[in-house]
Image (cartoon, rainbow, N blue to C red):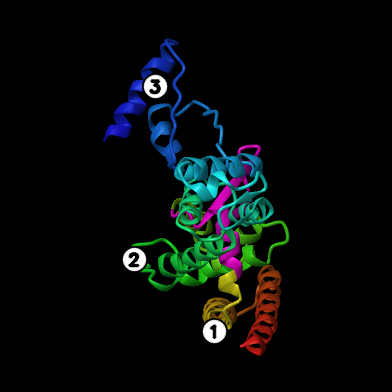
């Protein structure tokens, strides 16, 4: 209710040319609320990203300085050292951790408690992997959440294997697991912060991990042979079920066409198309069963 009132207020100011209104929000579905109040307006969007490596490093050092300013071990340390390691070790860990402020603050607190930077970032990756497994894959109720474990695992495994740390939005959307309501499923996973969708010319372009540290967590999950095999088999089983449904649909249509007393020449292209689709599915099923 409050968002609707705010959007109505912003619309009144904008339409009357009284002021420009700026909203700061972490809700990716903000445009739905604003579009109701301003259906014919184009919203100018600026996405705030994570810290750069230099800014992230300085943030951690400043945090450590605040926490340890009265510590003799800190005051005696040289400019290239910190508690539990050296600056180079810290830089390597920040490169893995990324520039998300909440993760950097947690990282700094762990170092302040006596952990080395490498141990701290390892613990954060392990904790993030467990969080991903529990929230997005293991304990998913399809009636409450708009995705399946297999869909979440597809994105996790694809991003873990991606060279540049991201995959094309169209690549995920056109995969077998996202053929039905794919865009709404990807939006739901973005809203749940498993992934982040970047735009190009106001259209979805690429998919990347929801938090920078998730990239390392995704790789850790993919290295779990038992988990990878179990979810891989479930994914292949779901794909086989989808193809069986398609086969039944095409065979049903062929039966209807074959029941006609005379075969009109107009339906021959359709019959050929259906037979070609069945042949393609059969070849795909053979390949999928070989993987199983």
Pointer 3 or 2: first along the chain: 3
Tell me the residue at 61%/44% (across/down).
57
Q: Is residue 230 above or below residue 198?
A: below
Kindly indicate the quadrant of the structure image that contains residue 9: top left
How crowded pointer 2 is (Cα within 10 Å; few <14, some 14-19, many 20+) is rated as: few
Instruction: Name the spot of residue 214 as percent of width and height, x first.
Output: 55, 59
Is there any visible trace of residue 284 in the rendered image? yes
Q: Is residue 16 magenta?
A: no
Q: CA distance from mark 1 to mark 3?
A: 54 Å
Q: Locate the C terminus and report the quarter of the image it occupies.
A: bottom right
Vertically, is 246 above or below 118?
A: below
Position above or below: 288 against 264: below
- Disc with the residue nearer the chain's start (1 vs 3): 3
The residue wearing badge 1 is 226
Q: Residue at x 44, y 65 (%)?
A: 131
Q: Position of residue 93 (x, y in %)?
A: 62, 56
Residue where numbered disc 2 is placed: 143
Q: Are marks 3 and 2 in contact (CB under 8 Å)?
A: no
Residue 179 in view here = no
Give the numbered dot on residue 87: none
């Amino acid at each position: 209710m409050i968002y609707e009132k705010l959007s109505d207020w912003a619309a009144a100011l904008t339409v009357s040319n009284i002021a420009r209104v700026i909203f700061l929000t972490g809700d990716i579905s903000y445009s739905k609320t604003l579009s109701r109040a301003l259906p014919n307006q184009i919203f100018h969007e600026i996405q705030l990203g994570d810290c750069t490596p230099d800014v992230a490093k300085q943030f951690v050092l400043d945090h450590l300085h605040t926490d340890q300013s009265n510590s003799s071990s800190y005051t005696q340390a040289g400019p290239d050292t910190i508690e539990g390691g050296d600056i180079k070790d810290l830089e390597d860990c920040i490169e893995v951790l990324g520039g998300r402020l909440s993760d950097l603050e947690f990282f700094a607190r762990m170092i302040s408690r006596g952990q080395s930077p490498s141990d701290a970032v390892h613990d954060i990756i392990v904790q993030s992997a467990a969080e991903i497994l529990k929230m997005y894959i293991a304990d998913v109720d399809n009636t409450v959440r708009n995705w399946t474990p297999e869909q979440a695992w597809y994105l996790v495994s694809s991003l873990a294997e991606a060279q540049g740390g991201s995959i094309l939005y169209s690549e995920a959307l056109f995969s077998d697991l996202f053929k039905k309501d794919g865009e709404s499923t990807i939006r739901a996973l973005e809203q749940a912060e498993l992934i982040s969708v970047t735009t190009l010319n106001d259209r979805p372009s690429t998919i990347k991990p929801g938090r920078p540290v998730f990239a390392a967590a995704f790789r850790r999950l993919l290295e779990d042979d038992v988990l990878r095999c179990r979810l891989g088999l479930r994914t292949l089983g779901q794909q086989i079920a989808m193809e069986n449904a398609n086969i039944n649909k095409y065979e049903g249509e062929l039966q209807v066409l074959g029941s006609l007393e005379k075969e009109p020449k107009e339906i021959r292209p359709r019959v050929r198309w259906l037979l070609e689709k069945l042949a393609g599915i059969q070849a795909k099923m053979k390949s999928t069963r070989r993987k199983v």
